[in-house]
Image (cartoon, grey):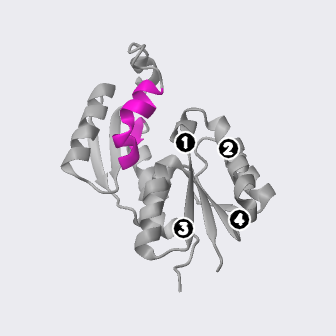
Amino acid sequence: MSRTAIVACGALALHLKAIAARDGLDLDVHPLPPELHNRPERIAPAVEAQIAALRDRYDRIVVGYADCGSRGAIDEVCERLGVERLAGETCYDIFAGAPLIESLRADEPGTFFLTDFLVRSFDRLVWRGLGLDRYPDLRDDYFSNYRRVVWLAQARTEELEAAAQVAAARLGLPLEIREVGEGGLATALPVRSRP
């Protein structure tokens, strides 16, 4: 049986596992740490190392990242190693579709996006990840050009909505919610269902 591995951003991994189980996809998800997004220059080397570790075990490997600020480095690794990646500049494009993200950015270029994963892990990845727990005065330096937070909700719940409100308040920004689901991510996967 042909097996496919996806070397995935940790922020997408749980969604990918859920989609694979729900849709009966022949897909094994291998997540990389989501903290790599705070240092995008480290994503492509981590992807390459993971592909090397999996190469002999799978017939096909897909990269479950958008460009993610790597400035083409992920694409270079994919091209050199002969693997494909999910389309898009960011995971926001994958979840919501590039036209909606472009429209939201055109309406307000100072938009900080959240996904369900980022809502759940805001304190660890954003607040502590950027050192704002130790140096809260940096908040205005980091976020002074932002005017709003848009939560691209994959599965809106009262608990997640409350957490998104807290995250936006910590940034001193208003929150908008767009329910986008997981359909864009499911459609982006170049993997077939099991027979």
Q: Nearer the viewer, residue 110 or 53?
A: 53
Q: Inspect the image, locate mark 4, and give the three-letter code of the amino acid beneath it.
A: Arg
Label 3 and label 2: CA atoms lie apart by 21 Å
Provide the residue span drawn in magenta. Answer: 110-129
Question: What kind of element bears circle 4?
Answer: helix
Q: Magenta segment, principal secondary structure?
A: helix
Local packing at callout 2 (Cα closer than 10 Å; few below 14, some 14-19, many 20+) is some
Does the segment drawn in magenta span residue 116?
yes
In the picture of the structure, the residue carrying the numbered disc 3 is: 189
Check the picture and name the quadrant holding the N terminus: bottom right
The mark found on residue 46 in the picture is 2
- Sequence order check: which comes first, mark 1 or mark 3? 1
Q: Inspect the image, locate mark 3, and give the three-letter code of the amino acid beneath it.
A: Leu
> Seen from this angle, which residue lies furthest right?
80
In the picture of the structure, the residue carrying the numbered disc 4 is: 57
Query: In front of the other: label 1 or label 3?
Result: 1
Location of residue 190 (image quadrant): bottom right
